[in-house]
Image (cartoon, rainbow, N blue to C red):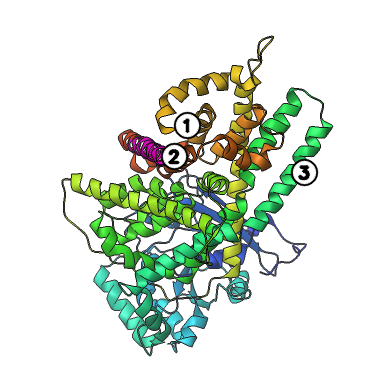
Amino acid sequence: MCTSTLPANFHPMSISRIALVGNPNCGKTALFNQLTGSRQKVANYAGVTVERKEGRFTAPSGRIFNLLDLPGAYSLDATSPDEVITRDICLGRIAGEALPELIVCVADATNLRLHLRFVLEVQRLGRPMVLALNMMDAARKRGISIDREELQRQLGMDVIETVAIRSDGAKALVAHLDGMALPEAVPATGGSAADLHAQVRKILAAAVTMPRATAMNDEMIDRWVLHPVFGLAILAAVMFFIFQAVFSWAEPLMDGITGGVTIVGQWFASTLPDGLLRSLIVDGIFAGLGAVLVFLPQILILFLFILVLEESGYLPRAAFLLDRMMFKAGLTGRSFIPLLSSFACAIPGIMATRSIQDPRDRLTTILVAPLMTCSARLPVYTLLIAAFIPATTVWNVFNLQGIVLFVLYVAGIVSAFAVAWVIKRMRKDKSEHALLMELPSYRLPGVRNIAIGLWERALIFLRRVTTIILSLTVLLWFLSTFPAPPAGATLPAIDYSLAGQIGRLLEHVFAPVGFNWQICIALIPGLAAREVAVSALGTVYAMSGSEDAVAAQLGPVIAAQWSLATALALLAWYVFAPQCMSTLAVIRRETNSWRVVAVSAGYLFGLAYLAAFLTYQITKALT
């Protein structure tokens, strides 16, 4: 990325606004990351749940460009909210959004037969435009010859070669933008789809020479990856390896965070005098937030693998591979990526269902997405697994705790398929739709893109820790502290507090599933964000006098006080746990239906209670 000091004659009016557009898998976001680096912000467009990414970069002359990364689209004949946003931004129809001065359309140089159609569609909008011909290194390796000057002449626009995954891969584009005068807008034109296809064929014949339609390496790898038997085995092995790594790789980092939180918490405990302030900081904030913060390494490792699989081009193939299985369950292969996104968080997973055109399949995917084991469940899972499952080695290779975590993830997946199958049997319209999707070429993941993705996820997690979780932790401390115990009280103060009274009432409801009153209290703030349940347990047990540094000792505390049946029942509960309030809000916004929200929350609560009840009673009988 090129930067320099602003020249003396620089004026703010020289700032340019550019929109990046392109098909999915064209490298558009990689190019955006290459240009803007950390100088970007992510939000949603007003009134819709479509992600809005904007950044800025400075050219060698000092000229500043504002860059907007628009959602990927296959066509401007919009069939999804993503494509509607892309089209309307390019035409200046979005209230509060300035019309881009220039559109940079990004196209995959290895797949121009598909991508040029969209380029021509965007050109027909009549806006000033430049074509960024991306992945030129991959095109050359495949023997694809592109006559850039002839392509420029055929399209009537500037064509710039880029390689978004290289550190200097956008240098030519930056130099071109820096030195260009804004091209004149051309009149908008119309035409049929047949006209576009005919024009694409004409341009390809004049400017592009391809030795073969697909890369030889792609074909060799796909023989195994897309095999109906070996492909599924490879996918299962990849997922199993991921969950082993989540436990094994994160342990040293988690120990470091635990030690740091313990040292700081003990310093506050020894420095502050007894009183409400000491109780708030030590028993409330450190016991609560420290119990959640320790799981950041595991969440980032999980995201590392998801980003690598996405960047490499493997995820669409996994979707294709699972289409037949998902079809039988009432889903589609297009549901795979939204459901996989839900392993990180159900919110982006539900938002990603906009790529599913069939409204029935989209609604089914929205309803089952919360059953995927989101990263917010990971702190609960790892706390209970570490406390109750021995860290032994199975067959001298596998970590038993990692196997249990894998089983919990599989339980969520199987449950989602089962619920989708029931929905399929209940719906009146039995018609089906074939899966049509692009399989991009394999490519090495870009280190910059992976790093930016992990950084964004870390910031999101830390933002939740310092806002939602902190607020709820302080609220729970307040409820656990007041009213003060009466004179002559012999029990811990929390037993006389509002939280204690609420927990005792809920204990009657949850006694059949083995939950004590401390767990009942933790479930309430857990409705706002699932991982808050861990911080809530830390606060409750600290207020109960179990440990001064319970943030580091919560596992041993519950291992000593809970039965195995209770721990397994709580794990079973969280496989189906009713989703957080933010997820319910997104379901409402995506479906515009309170009925869908009620159905989603209701069936998940029922399944969670039933699973916990059966697990508790069976384990209790066996042990």
Residue identified by numbered label 3:
263
Badge 3: residue crowd in 10 Å (few <14, some 14–19, many ≥20): some
Residue with the mark numbered 1: 515
Q: Is residue 480 above or below residue 248?
A: above
The tag earlier along the polypeptide, 3 or 1, is 3
Quarter of the image for residue 495 reads: top right
* In the image, residue 618 lies in the stretch drawn in magenta: yes
Query: Residue 380, percent across and down?
Result: 53, 44
Q: Are marks 3 and 1 in contact (CB under 8 Å)?
A: no
Marks 1 and 2, the one that precedes in the sequence: 1
Earlier residue among tags 2 and 3: 3
Real-space Cα distance between discs 3 and 1?
32 Å
**Span highlighted in magenta in the image:** 603-623
Is 121 covered by the magenta stretch?
no
Residue under the image location 36 percent in, 38 percent down: 614
Q: Secondary structure at mark 2?
A: helix
Q: Can see residue 554? A: yes
Residue 232 versus residue 127: which sits nearer the camera? 232
